[in-house]
Image: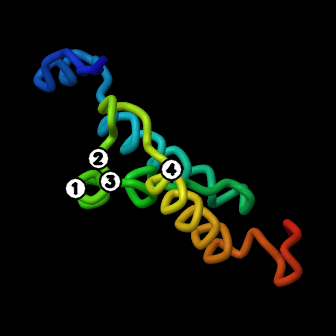
Amino acid sequence: MSFVATGDPAETAAGKLTLSVIRDELAAIVEQRSTSDPNIHYLDGLTLYGPADFAEFPLADRLHPGPQAHQRIGRRFADAIREMHLERPDGHRQ
């Protein structure tokens, strides 16, 4: 079984959403709100698993990551949390 996204990217001008539009909007909202809330953060999922990763660890059903991809995603997520200083050196969240 394979999953295929349908739709026309040109329809975003009419207000239809794509993952790119959603990512851009979420990033903008978080940037705006972070000025008054230091506890809000945004992490683009493409930094966890992106096109280069797909070349190395393709999605078998074109939707779900396999075990190797999950390990990479987990490592990158943990690294991102540390970089955001959301985890203390003892491993507990601040």
Alpha-carbon distance for marks 2 and 4? 11 Å
Alpha-carbon distance for marks 1 and 3? 6 Å
Kindly identify the residue that appears in the image at 45 percent across and 45 percent down: 66
Q: Residues within 10 Å of mark 1 (few under 14, many from 20)?
A: few
Q: Are marks 4 and 1 in contact (CB under 8 Å)?
A: no
Alpha-carbon distance for marks 3 and 4? 9 Å
Q: Amino acid at mark 4?
A: Pro
- Please tell me the numbered disc located at residue 55: 1
Q: Position of residue 5 (x, y in %)?
A: 25, 21
Q: Are marks 1 and 2 in contact (CB under 8 Å)?
A: yes
Q: Position of residue 32 (x, y in %)?
A: 54, 52
The residue carrying mark 4 is 67
Q: Residues within 10 Å of mark 2 (few under 14, many from 20)?
A: some
Q: Amino acid at mark 3?
A: Phe
- Please tell me the numbered disc located at residue 57: 3
Q: Are marks 3 and 2 in contact (CB under 8 Å)?
A: yes
- Please tell me the numbered disc located at residue 58: 2
